[in-house]
Image: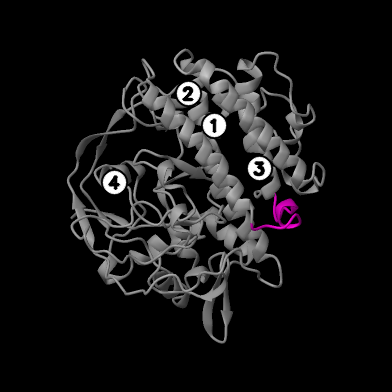
Amino acid sequence: MPTRIPNAKSPDHASFSALANRFDTVRATTEALAAPLSSEDVSLQSMPDASPTKWHLAHTSWFFETFILEHLEPAFKPFDPTFRVLFNSYYNAVGDKHPRGERGMISRPNLAEVLGYRRDVTARIKALLPAVETADLKFLALMWLGCHHEEQHQELILTDLKHLLSKNPLKPAYQTLWPLTTIHGRKSRWVSYRGGVISIGLDIDQVAPGFAFDNESPRHQVFIEPFELASYPVTHGDFAAFIADHGYARPELWLSMGWDWVQTNQIAAPLYWEQRDGQWHTFTLHGVVPIDAHTPICHVNYFEADAFARWASTQSHLKGARLPREAEWEHAAVHAEIEGNFLESRALHPLALRDEKHSLHPAQLFGDVWEWTQSAYLPYPRYRAVEGAVGEYNGKFMCNQFVLRGGSCATPRQHVRPTYRNFFPPEARWQFSGLRLARDAE
């Protein structure tokens, strides 16, 4: 549930208009992402953690139908009663769910029927908008949540599709824009920050333009020691050096659970990496390409990020390196411009930095890759989940997960902000997840 909506105490026409435009853009963007895919592409599921594109198309419509239309539409009638179970994700308060690992078995409804469902829900939401423009704050809050929820699924469409296409022996491309940029190396350095009491998060009563999920609140104070943050994310080249130094074969670098994961799964490189003629290549949404040493590393999980940081701390120029804490990351990012390589760039792959104008501050804090922190995903002090089914959105996952910050090359630009808390279990690596080093200041 969002903690804020624009002008929350008295929604005006401008904020309502922004919401209506955002809804139109979000719905069109999701369908544009699916447009290049065949009916076979959208129906397959490559692993239990991923979902078919067709399921994402339906579930994001299910969300608007279940949490908005069902409660606010006069004489509500579901598009298809069976969809309530088929496209429920994890909302136990709503009712039964189709097993997550069997979403690829849903051959019916077909793609045309799912797109018809989307058109129906979109039209009914738009018909409902004028009647509640200035009357229902709960409706407006749910609408903002629905838009941001669908933007999360836009990123999932791409990450799940990438995993799916990587399993095809033909290694097909989703799009072919390679090479993306002219790339130059950048030497990372440390940016220093004072310690002390700082405030992070957002206040539920704060009246300001924008949106936030409930897990970003309430705003509260934390104490941080003086620290330093690397000016750039860890790169593919950095990680190749870790591999060359037998990083995946050295148990002293790994958490116990991480070492068990490496051994059990015989892991020797990040997801999608493979050796061809003695050179590392990686699978991208553009097909298989040689790794570029200067682009931020992606598709590493928490275990790999932590092991890399431990290895880096043994290097003379990176002595003391570790993963940042989420309060440190937010403290560094709060004054940074939210700009970078997002979904809108269409690169769909992390890029090397081309602009040095932020040389006094850490660069690429937003976009390119989600950055692992060493912080467990836990509730902030005084956090309370909202009542009802939408209260299941974030709060019930605050266990056995770690926080990532900053967004990725598959995240919509308007979806991110310094306080945004993404989270995944430590073994997950099919997202565009990377890392940035930190260390305690001397």
Residue 129, percent from left and from top: 53, 22
Marked residue nearer the N-terminal end (4 or 2) = 2
Instruction: Give the structural element (helix, strand or loop) at label 3.
Output: helix
- Residue 146 disc label: 1
Q: Is residue 166 left or right of residue 281?
A: right
Dot in front, 1 or 4: 1
Query: Callout 4: few (<14), some (14-19), or many (20+) C-alpha neighbours within 10 Å?
Result: many
- Tag 4 near tag 2, CB within 8 Å: no
Task: Give the quadrant of residue 421.
Answer: top left
Q: What residue is pinned by disc 4?
A: 333
Query: Callout 2: few (<14), some (14-19), or many (20+) C-alpha neighbours within 10 Å?
Result: some
Amino acid, disc 4: Ala
Dot in front, 4 or 3: 3
Q: CA distance from mark 3 to mark 1?
A: 13 Å
Marked residue nearer the N-terminal end (1 or 4) = 1
Give yes or no for residue 113 being in the magenta stretch.
no
- Residue 57 disc label: 3
Query: Callout 1: few (<14), some (14-19), or many (20+) C-alpha neighbours within 10 Å?
Result: many
Amino acid, disc 1: Gly
Instruction: Give the structural element (helix, strand or loop) at label 1.
Output: helix
Give yes or no for residue 38 being in the magenta stretch.
yes
Q: Which residues are magenta?
A: 36-48
Amino acid, disc 3: Leu
Q: What residue is pinned by disc 2?
A: 141
Residue 145, percent from left and from top: 50, 30
**As displayed, is residue 163 above or below residue 134?**
below
- Tag 3 near tag 1, CB within 8 Å: no
